[in-house]
Image (cartoon, grey):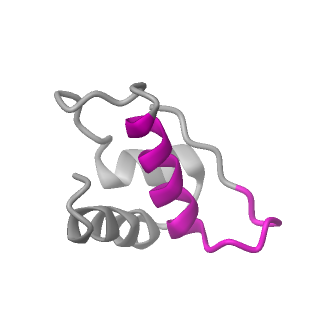
Amino acid sequence: MHIHISERDGVPIYLQIVNQVKLLIASGRLLPTEELPPIRALAEQLTITPNTVARAYRELENAGIV
């Protein structure tokens, strides 16, 4: 799973993650059998705090997407 974030686009980072995961699912690039990366691993990859990734994952879970 490859996610890109931008601090300049005005959208909160956690929402950027949520939107990109939704796009990956809708496009078939993230399959139902695939797991999301661990919170810490994605946070390291994106050089953001684990809390931001955790918030994005909570949003996806609350929406019934994951």
Image check: 15 left or right of 26?
Answer: right
Q: Which residues are magenta?
A: 6-26
Residue at the (38%, 38%) spot, across then down = 25
* Residue 1 location, quadrant: top left
10, above or below 22, in the image: below
Determine if the magenta segment contains residue 22. Answer: yes
Q: Position of residue 60 (x, y in %)?
A: 31, 62
Point out the residue furthest to the front here. Answer: 26
56 or 42, which lies in front? 56
* Residue 62 location, quadrant: bottom left
Image check: 4 left or right of 40?
Answer: right
Determine if the magenta segment contains residue 40. Answer: no
Q: Position of residue 47 (x, y in %)?
A: 59, 54
Residue at the (41%, 62%) spot, across then down = 53
**How many numbered marks are there?**
0
Residue at the (23%, 29%) spot, across then down = 34
Residue at the (20%, 61%) spot, across then down = 64
12, above or below 46, in the image: below
Q: Position of residue 2 (x, y in %)?
A: 53, 33
30 or 3, which lies in front? 30
Q: Decide whether the magenta segment is chiefly helix, strand or loop.
A: helix
12 or 37, which lies in front? 12
19, above or below 26, in the image: below
Q: Position of residue 51 (x, y in %)?
A: 40, 72
Image check: 59 left or right of 43?
Answer: left
Image check: 10 left or right of 50?
Answer: right
